[in-house]
């Protein structure tokens, strides 16, 4: 969920060019999304735009509008979430604030109409009909299987968390005032029609959520109406507002969001601390104390600035000569909080090892590769400065779909750790379609079997036919 922040001041940067509009006529056969691979799914979402074109011309630059005349796709979109779904969802125990917000834009400001505690469908429908309130449903992928299927694939594609909200707005009403988000936004129109107005950003690629007064943002750069089956993308920072035209049925749209706190700046913050920590072990100057009373100075001295500049140049030179850039938190945070692999039924394939118990003559192959990260870190069982690095393997197979993107819910990491001596063997498994356990680059047969058994028990590899 976007964080609430102070409104940004108007900047002077030039905004992106108006969004491109693409009209698509229906193909001969039924249209559906392609779930064969993460890239196939994204390609089908933005069809007929090619992914190369999208990332070269639109991603983080300007909006893209795709209007489709495709009844089959419109029907599929409508099946993702309907107003009528709320009755059964409320019976499962939804709560105001956590699962559902009820709001309306009044005189350019958001008015929250939430009750306390549990949501009762009849009261919710009454507020929708009589108060013309928008219903915002948080993270519906927790309950709707097809949205789980879509967002899990998109998390594999982007390598970033992917959340969603559903907005259901009655005719002649608007839920939110003009605002911008700190996420990349993909809009799927599910039911009815919604009129959108997009404005040039005051904070391109914004890092925080912000509300803008309508009298300060000028005229819309683009204005259009979405119908079922239509698609809209716009970058973070794009100021926008949307309403349901009067005289029509209600409108339902799905907002899919990604790339929150996933910038180069975030990556630097994540990796530089580990680089400094490791370098300080070897560099006496980095371990030297600060000048007396430096922290008491009103302004940092010129000597201190030059010293920090020199350290940064030294770290940059060191970085050029290393193969490993350690992620302190981003990799682990992504894997801990993302969706588990989509599965039908009881999900036994996520908790039951596949194939026979691995032996030295077994062939093994990695599975769920997009749901696993491998990273280096200090041995967490030791606290002294000489502790060695370990290999940590984190995965999302045991993540709980019910807590996805809920923020305040408790999450835990799942995975394994190995000594650095196992790195070559792990890379063999990662980079091979299949490999014999006896061919792993480890010193003893016992180490080879133990590594394979650990990965197999965690359901990260499957065993195939034994070699002769």
Image: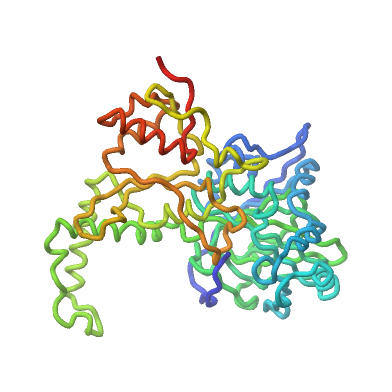
Q: Position of residue 180 (x, y in %)?
A: 58, 67
Q: Residue furthest right?
A: 247
Q: Position of residue 189 (x, y in %)?
A: 73, 54
> In front here: 281 or 49?
281
Q: Is residue 18 visible?
A: no
Q: Taking 36 as reference, is 316 above or below it?
A: below
> In front here: 255 or 126?
126
Q: Position of residue 161 (x, y in %)?
A: 53, 54
Q: Taking 185 as reference, is 145 above or below it?
A: above
x 53%, y 48%: residue: 398
Quadrant of the rendering where the N terminus is positioned: bottom right
Q: Taking 223 as reference, is 301 above or below it?
A: below
Q: Is residue 279 rendered to the left or right of residue 77? A: left
Q: How many numbered marks does the figure carry?
A: 0
x 79%, y 45%: residue: 75
Q: Is residue 333 visible?
A: yes
Quadrant of the rendering where the C terminus is positioned: top left
Quadrant in which residue 129 is drawn: bottom right
> In front here: 111 or 378?
378
């Amino acid at each position: 969920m976007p964080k609430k922040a102070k409104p940004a001041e108007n900047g002077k940067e030039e905004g992106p060019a108006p969004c491109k509009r693409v009209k698509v006529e229906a193909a001969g056969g039924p249209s559906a999304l392609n779930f064969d691979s993460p890239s196939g799914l994204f390609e089908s979402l933005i069809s007929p735009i090619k992914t190369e074109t999208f990332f070269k011309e639109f991603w983080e630059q300007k909006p893209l509008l795709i209007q489709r005349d495709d009844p089959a796709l419109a029907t599929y979109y409508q099946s993702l979430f309907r107003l009528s779904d709320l009755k059964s969802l409320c019976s499962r125990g939804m709560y105001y604030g956590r699962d559902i917000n009820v709001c309306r834009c009044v005189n350019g400001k958001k008015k929250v109409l939430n009750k306390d505690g549990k949501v009762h469908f009849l009261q919710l429908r009454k507020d929708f009909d009589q108060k013309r309130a928008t219903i915002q449903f948080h993270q519906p992928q927790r309950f709707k299987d097809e949205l789980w299927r879509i967002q899990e694939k998109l998390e594999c594609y982007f390598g970033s968390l992917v959340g969603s909200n559903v907005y259901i707005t009655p005719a002649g009403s608007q839920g939110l005032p003009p605002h911008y988000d700190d996420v990349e936004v993909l809009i799927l129109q599910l039911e009815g029609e919604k009129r959108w107005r997009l404005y040039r950003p005051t904070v391109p690629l914004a890092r925080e959520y912000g509300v803008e007064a309508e009298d300060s943002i000028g005229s819309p750069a683009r204005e259009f109406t979405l119908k079922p089956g239509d698609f809209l993308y716009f970058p973070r920072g794009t100021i926008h507002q949307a309403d349901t035209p009067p005289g029509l049925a209600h409108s339902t749209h799905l907002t899919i969001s990604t790339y929150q706190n996933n910038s180069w700046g975030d990556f630097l913050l994540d990796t530089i601390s580990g680089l400094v920590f490791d370098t300080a072990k070897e560099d006496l100057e980095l371990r030297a104390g600060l000048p007396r009373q430096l922290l008491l100075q009103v302004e940092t001295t010129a000597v201190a600035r030059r010293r920090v500049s020199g350290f940064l140049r030294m770290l940059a030179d060191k970085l050029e000569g290393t193969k490993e850039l350690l992620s302190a938190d981003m990799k682990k945070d992504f894997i801990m909080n993302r969706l588990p692999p989509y599965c039908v039924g009881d999900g036994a394939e996520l908790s039951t090892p596949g194939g026979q118990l691995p032996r030295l003559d077994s062939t093994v192959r990695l599975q769920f590769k997009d749901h696993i990260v491998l990273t280096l870190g200090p041995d967490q069982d030791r606290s002294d400065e000489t502790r060695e690095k370990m290999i940590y393997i984190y995965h999302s197979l045991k993540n709980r779909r019910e807590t996805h993107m809920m923020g305040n819910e408790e999450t835990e990491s799942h995975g394994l750790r190995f000594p650095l001596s196992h790195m070559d063997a792990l890379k063999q498994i990662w980079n091979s379609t299949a490999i014999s356990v006896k061919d792993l680059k480890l010193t003893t047969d016992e180490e080879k079997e133990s590594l394979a058994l650990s990965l197999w028990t965690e359901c990260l590899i499957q065993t195939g036919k034994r070699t002769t």
